[in-house]
Amino acid sequence: MERGPFMQCPRCGADNLPTVTACVRCGLPAYPPSGRYPYPTGGGPVVLPGLTSARGTPLATIATVLAVLGALASLGYGLYALIARRAIYLDISDDPSSVSSADAALSDTLNAVLLWVAVALVVLAMVLWLVSVVSVRRGRGGLGLTGLTLALLGGSAAVVGAVLLTGVDSATTADDGAVAYVAIGTGFLAMALGLLCGAMALHHQPLEPMSPPYGTGPYANQYSDPYGPPSGPVAP
């Protein structure tokens, strides 16, 4: 820590000139070219060899990106199911002749493409998220637990909607199809929100110790002193 023309020794607190190569009181070596001690003594956060962060983990980074992509795909399909797809079934229920076979076929094709893209991204994102939780302990905490709960509840709602949809086969049951797509769309929106929470949990995971802390005392966890405590007589 610099104070005027002096530098404070991180071990004993003595003031030294910037040109010294070792502390005048305890003998702790310094870097001769710059006169700066090779140990952090303050300022911003310091990432030590015994700490790791989510942003420094490749697996967590990939899981974060996939969680965001899965959330966007799930959001897109959820809105499509609640608006356009549900509208098709409502139109068929009101007046079957108002929906041509070409419109119905186009809706079926678009629904299948959006559904499978969303499902594939959501499943892949969830798998990598769980792998990150187990292998590198990322994506946990309150935010991660909230996201996982939302994703599971959303998936359950989508499955219930898919089961309801299996009984829809004619204009007389089109109302049931509209209800089924409400459940499906709501489920995908919940999964999108859950994946966004998971992405934030993966990205903003706080630093965690991977090894025992560096000693005790006023400078514990700030630096590791390779020279040990001062020995012999200490200069006044």
Image (spheres, helix red, strand yellow):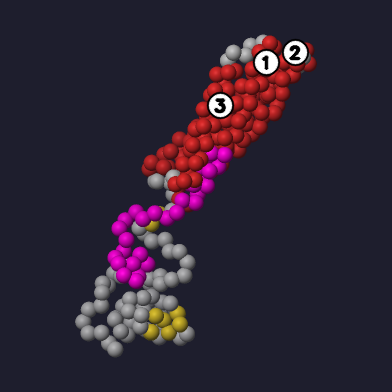
Residue tagged 2: 96
Which residue lies most toward the left here? 232
> Circle 2 sits in a helix, a strand or a loop, which is it?
helix
What numbered label is drawn on residue 158? 3
Start and end of the magenta stretch?
A: 193-222
Q: Residue at x 53, y 39 (%)?
A: 194
In this view of the protein, can residue 129 be seen by the observer? yes
Instruction: Return the x and y of residue 145 as percentages of the image width and height.
Output: 46, 41
Q: Residue 231 at what x, y percent from top left?
A: 22, 79
Label 1–label 3 contact, CB within 8 A: no
Gap between marks 2 and 1, in whole Å?
9 Å
Relative vertical location of residue 231 with respect to residue 124 in this rendering, above or below:
below
| Left or right of 201 in this view: 183 | right
- Residue density around tag 1, few if under 14, some if 14–19, many if 20 or more, within 10 Å: many
- Numbered badge on residue 174: 1
- Looking at the image, which residue is at 25% across and 77% down? 230
Q: Is residue 209 magenta?
A: yes
Badge 2: few (under 14), some or many (20 or more) residues near its Cα, within 10 Å?
some
Mark 1 or mark 2, which is nearer the start of the sequence? Answer: 2
